[in-house]
Structures are given as structure tokens and as C-alpha cells.
Image: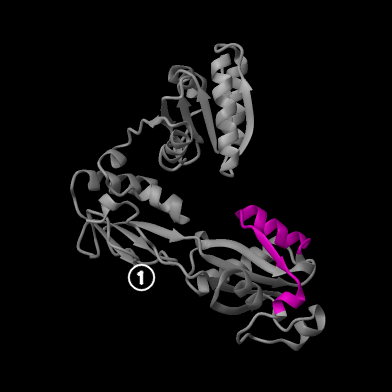
Amino acid sequence: MTLSIACFTAAGEALAQRLEIALRAEGEQVRRRDRIRSKTSPSLGEWAAEGFALDDALVFIGASGIAVRAIAPLVRDKHTDPAVVTVDEGGRFVVPLLSGHVGGANDLARQIAVLLGAQPVISTATDLNGRFAVDVWAKHSGVVLDDPQLAKAISAALLEGQTVGICSDFPLNGTLPRGLADQEKTELGLYITLHGEKHPFRHTLLAIPQIVTLGIGCRRGTSLEVLEGVVDRFLAHVSIDRRSVREVATIDRKREEAGLVALCASRRWPLRCFTAGQLAAVEGHFTTSAFVQETVGVDNVCERAAVLAGGKLLAPKYQGMGVTVAAAILNWQPCLAEKEEERE
């Protein structure tokens, strides 16, 4: 997590320095630690605006009202706003103000409280009532939820004591949280899947785990448009939702391939590259090509790269217009019961 810390007094600055050292020791990236000399000057608003653009979280050492006024013009959506947390100058209380669940402010408040010996002040209803929060689970599990409004509806239903259905294409790990039932007779339900074609409930929230790696090979100079077309046809052919893709893998000689780089950039897919020797060493049965062997030094790029980066081969080589695509999948099981009080 990348975060910035603002303080306003000498006491606040001492606490901010102590907090920065503790957070860095836990692997967090403190991008900025600033003492703001005037709480009402434009510089505080500018500081907050920069943090909203660049940071995962903002921490204010001081009164919550100062933070509220600073961030008020910037607040847009809980799915995009950073976490905002305040800490009093005495280091006694830590308050998550914004993006408690999706942005991680609740978790950050708890983390800071432990580091400072303070009390986290958590006010979100699912936390207070010990109920399953689907958006928190999704964030921690690397899962994409396709409809924020349905996610809200599920949390509301669970808080009211209603039963919410769950259906999964993956074996569920552990006991289901209170209120979730492994059945398809409820009006509202959660469906964990890579496909997204089936809707087992009248109101189905799709939960799509990002566990698929695409292995891609292509001719030199292949355009972005061609790559997009072949990749999308492949995903449709094997019924894999695009949102399940976590990364792309290929051979190192394609590291600078403009079309492939542009594809990954446009879809926010990390690109991993392997040498021919690394690919050749991957064990398994793959679709071989003498032409590919002669050209790049290994008999298959897409399948081998997908497996090396992403686990078990899910879909073998698909070919078109000089592009080859394959998919691999991580060994993953959803675990929804994260807290003891939910395992009832």
C-alpha cells in the first residue's frame, strides 16, 4: 500500500514520524510525510488532491474535521477513492473516514492501532454485527464483483437476517458465514465463476476470481487490433470472462512487441517474459511446432508461458492471424469464513 501522512503541529509531527517508521518496517510505502503549516490554506487541499491521485491511502494526524474539509471536494466513489484515516495527536484513537471496506481504511485503521497501541474506531455495520461483507472478501481474495449495487444488496440482506444463496464453480473452503446458504432457491445470491454466462439466482452477483494467465505468442509487428480480436475470440471460445485474467506471459523476445505491450497496457494486464530456456524446461504435454522451435528456440510459446506463470493448463493453443493464445489457471479455492464469529 502506498500512503501519505499529514500532520499540523509539533506533537503531530512526532507521532507521524513514529508511524512512518513503523509502517515502513511492515513493508508499506510511505510516499510523503508532510507538516501542513496552515489547516485552512489551499496547500492542504492540494496535498489531499495529490494523495487522491497517487496514493492508496491518506493518514491525517489531527482532528477528523480537518480531514473531512480537505477531502470533501475530492470524494467520488467508494470503489475508486483512497482509504482515509485520522489519528488524534495523542495516538489514542484511529478513525477510518472513507473507503472502509473496498479501499481498506478499516484494515489500515486496525494496523495503525496495533502499531501505536491505539483503539480503532470502526463504524461499518457488517463489522459491528460480525456479518460477511462481500466487498471486503472480494478485495482480499482477488475477486472482481460485476455489480456494486448487488454487492450492497447482499450486505443489506445479511444485516437484516435474510438468507443469501451462494453457488460456486470452485469447491468452497471452510464453513459458510452466517446467512449464506449453498442453494439456488433464494432471490438473491453470489455466484463464483470464471464464465459469467449462468445466473442461478433471480438477482445474481457474479464474483470473478482473477486467477487466469494468458500465454500469447505472435508474429513480429502484429497490431493491437489483431491481438485484441484473437484474444477476445479465444476468451469467448473457451467461455472465460475477460475480468478473470490476471496477467499475460510470453517469450522474452516479445518484451518490446508494440502491439502486445499496448494490449497489456489497455487492459491493465501485467506482462511477464521468460527465456526460451525457461520455457523449454516446463514439464508437461504441449502442442509442438517445428516452425516455432526453429524461429524462437522452443517448440511452443503460449502454452508453456501460461503454465510457467499461471499454474495448470486450462485451455490449449488457439491460433489465428499469426497469434497464438492459451490459458492457465491457478490452484484456487474460495474461503468466505474469515472470522470466527462468521463460522456459525
Reply yes or no: does residue 195 show up in magenta.
no
- Element type at mark 1: loop
Left or right of 167 in this view: 69: right
Residue at 66% in and 58% down: 264
Q: Position of residue 99 (x, y in %)?
A: 44, 36
Which residue was labeled with disc 1?
A: 171
Q: Quadrant of the N terminus?
A: top right
Q: Toward the viewer: 297 or 232?
A: 297
Above or below for 300 versus 271: below
Above or below for 161 versus 14: below
Residue at 72% in and 72% down: 218
Q: Position of residue 154 (x, y in %)?
A: 29, 49
Does the rendering let one see residue 28? no
Q: Toward the viewer: 135 or 151?
A: 135
Snapshot quadrant of residue 38: top right
Snapshot quadrant of residue 48: top right
Q: Which residues are magenta?
A: 255-279
Q: Position of residue 105 (x, y in %)?
A: 45, 37
